[in-house]
Image (spheres, rainbow, N blue to C red):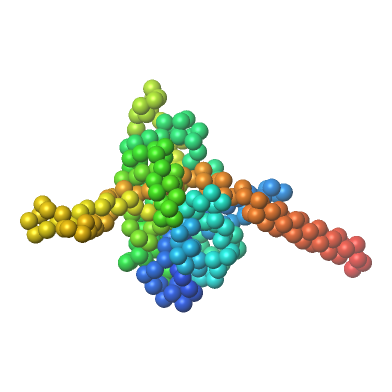
Amino acid sequence: MPRIDDQLLDCSVYLYPTVEQAERGDAVGGTGFIIGVPYRRAKGYTHRYAVTCSHVIRRGAPVVRVNTRHGEFDVLDLGPKQWTHHPDGHDIAVCPVSLPANDFKYKWLPQEMFMTKELIEQEDIGPGDDTFFVGRFITHEGRQRNLPTVRFGNISMLPWEKVRNRMGLDQESFLVESRSLPGYSGSPVFVYISAFAKRPGKSTTISSSDRGPWLLGIDWGHVNEHQKVLESDGETPVKDGWVVQQNSGMMAVQPAWNLAELLQVQELVEMREDREQQWEAQERRDASVVADSAERPH
């Protein structure tokens, strides 16, 4: 496993039910991350979004905590109605955020990093490829500022077999052998190709420029095993059929292409268009003030 780029740690944010709980650092909520969508009308500008799982918001944790440039944190008091959910019921939600670079310490992920079905085929991504995810180890997460942890794993299954998600939908999902726990829901999951990995479908070693990492998708939970509760003899199931759940070690990851789809829903496209029109109007006003000042006699 190579050294993880600190910029990937800085894309992570924490989510809480209330501002007060965020300020205290209570062990509730989930994880999110920041992405950017470029302006259509101007180069060098981006719309920023917080991303997390839909179930994190629907279960009452819409408030975002972000690190500041001063080594502390600040809280964005977002409400559940400010988040947009995937129209097809996929376990993913986004919210536009304003995060001035002079105040906040964070990085955003570009859409060029998103995994696609075409990239899976092009790079022969599949079982065994290395993954890591950045999120909130809820029992030791950092009280004075967000201190995300990195956990590691490997792709076990490509997302061609759906998994029932927390909202009852059969969700397109990668299965990743990893150690996800409550609190990591909404974490960005990355995949990369080892520097010396041979690809089953390719004849040469992948060069370093083709290794990634790419955003594989979003951790929406772990797949539980159900085991029967046995009598004291260790062999006979109890009569009422009790079962217990335990973490199977298999994490379910929603593909990044569902996030790309969500960003193109009409509501979000119109919001971006309105913001860019406001930006252009402000640019024209500023230019007019400068021109008017230059024409005045000194």
Q: Residue shown at 37%/29% (left/top)? A: 199
Given residues 55 and 170, the one toward you in this image is 170
> Picture coordinates of residue 280 (x, y %)?
76, 56
Whether residue 209 sits left or right of residue 97 in the image: it is: left
Q: Is residue 288 visible?
A: yes
> Picture coordinates of residue 61 (x, y %)?
47, 67
Query: Hey, which residue is sitting farthest right in the picture?
Result: 297
Q: Quadrant of residue 156?
A: top left
Given residues 91 and 132, the one toward you in this image is 91
Q: Residue shown at 56%/46% (left/top)? A: 261
Query: Hey, which residue is sitting farthest front in the picture?
Result: 239
Given residues 127 and 81, the one toward you in this image is 81
Instruction: Look at the picture and state if 260 lies above or below 136.
Output: above
Instruction: Look at the picture and state if 99 lies above or below 174.
Output: below
Query: Hey, which residue is sitting farthest top in the picture?
Result: 203
Whether residue 15 sits left or right of residue 137 in the image: it is: right
* Quadrant holding the C terminus: bottom right
Q: Residue shown at 41%/55% (left/top)? A: 166
> Picture coordinates of residue 131 (x, y %)?
37, 44
* Quadrant holding the N terminus: top left
Task: Count how many numbered circles sit on residues in the image.
Answer: 0
> Picture coordinates of residue 253 (x, y %)?
41, 47
Whether residue 199 sits left or right of residue 235 in the image: it is: right
Q: Is residue 10 visible?
A: no
Query: Hey, which residue is sitting farthest left in the picture?
Result: 233
